[in-house]
Image (cartoon, helix red, strand yellow):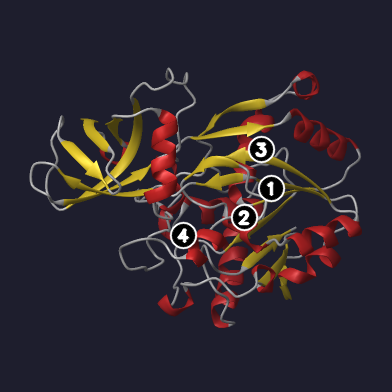
Amino acid sequence: MKTELFNFHLPEQLIAQEPLPDRDASRLLTLDRKEKTWSDRAMRDLPEILQPGDLLILNQTRVIPARLRATRDTSGGKVEFLLLPPETSNAPAAGASISRRVLTKSGGKLKIGESFTLAGGAKVTLRERHGEAGDVIEIHCGEDEFNRHVNAHGEVPLPPYIRRPAGPSSVEDKQRYQTVFAQTPGAVAAPTAGLHFTDSLLSKLDARGVQREYLTLHVGPGTFRPVKADVVEEHFVDAEPYLIPQRTVAAILRAKAEKRRVIAVGTTSLRALEGSLGKLAPEQLKTSGDVSGKTDLFIYPPGEFKIVDGLLTNFHIPKSSLLMLVCAIASPGSTDGIDFIKRAYEHAVSSGYRFYSYGDACLIL
């Protein structure tokens, strides 16, 4: 399948640079995948759009201030490190030096063994070079001390299409590039569909009888990466760690047994569910506790879905793996969703919907 099938024209002025004053003031394009129609709604309409008994699954990962600025100890040149989600390997001994994978940006060629000083004074050494897979830096302090350093001196890892001057992050970005239900630190990109929720909107969903449960998938920077291969099947998606609590698994099993809809809030929640529970037999799900691991699931038309019946998501980058996922869930088991989503996106563009992380939302049911 040609990647060009997933291209569309997006005027630059529709790429949202700032969040709206109120999280739930976003517009909501609601798509009916059976009738192949859509309607213009608002995020605040969500309680009346959903049905009592619907089960929302939200990603409660917490974005860390993962953008770290540094200087080369040899030359004083500027370097930028973007932390990748932590590995799920054994924790280091207390106080021991640690290593982390990073994406590196610099004005010159860096050498293995070279040392750097992070803003705030922490010292690191470049240990391995792997390019897009993530270089490895050795951090010359313990994990707790490094986490304190990151929280004090790191910057919000906004995606590259949101333009900000170099330097400390604004108070607004620190607050708004984070969901109101964020819990477990580790993401280096926000699960942006969740940014539209407020405590008030969640309360109204409760009153409507809409259920919700949580999982954690630590989002990596690969979520912004366009598909560079000419053929979709040649692309791969970076693996990201997830944890689905037993409580969430049990709620999904009850919903499926009672023929209630399971709706993923965000492509991250969907990939965690389909990349884990979607691969287990029903008897395995009934006996499982917490479900954890990593998923590199890449869904594109004519993909099938075993767990998820709907998706709330933002508007995505042309020719991205996330847009391909959206086209797949718009018409599971066929390629008809490609044309449907492209027509819906054309409507969104002509109607002035705001795109990407700080943009408006799209609900596919």
Pointer 1 or 3: first along the chain: 1
Q: Is residue 314 left or right of residue 206?
A: left
Pointer 1 or 4: first along the chain: 4
Q: Residue at x 44, y 49 (%)?
A: 65
Q: Is residue 6 left or right of residue 196?
A: left
Mark 1 secondary-structure assignment: strand
Mark 2 secondary-structure assignment: loop
Q: Which residue is mark 1?
A: 58
Please state the horizontal and vertical placement of residue 39, each as a whole percent of the image. Answer: 73, 74
Pointer 3 or 4: first along the chain: 4
Q: Could you tell me the amino acid type at mark 2?
A: Thr
Pointer 2 or 1: first along the chain: 1
Q: Nearer the viewer, mark 1 or mark 4?
A: 1
C-alpha separation, residue under disc 2 versus residue under disc 1: 10 Å
Q: Which residue is mark 4?
A: 5
Foreground of the two, 185 or 120: 120
Is residue 126 shown above or below 49? Answer: above
Q: Are marks 2 and 3 in contact (CB under 8 Å)?
A: no
Q: Which residue is mark 2?
A: 179
Q: Are marks 2 and 4 in contact (CB under 8 Å)?
A: no
Report if residue 128 is visible in the image: no
Please state the horizontal and vertical placement of residue 154, each as a whole percent of the image. Answer: 38, 50
Give the label on residue 273, or none.
3
Neighbourhood count class around disc 2 (C-alpha, 10 Å): few under 14, some 14–19, many 20 upward: many
Mark 4 secondary-structure assignment: helix
Neighbourhood count class around disc 1 (C-alpha, 10 Å): few under 14, some 14–19, many 20 upward: many
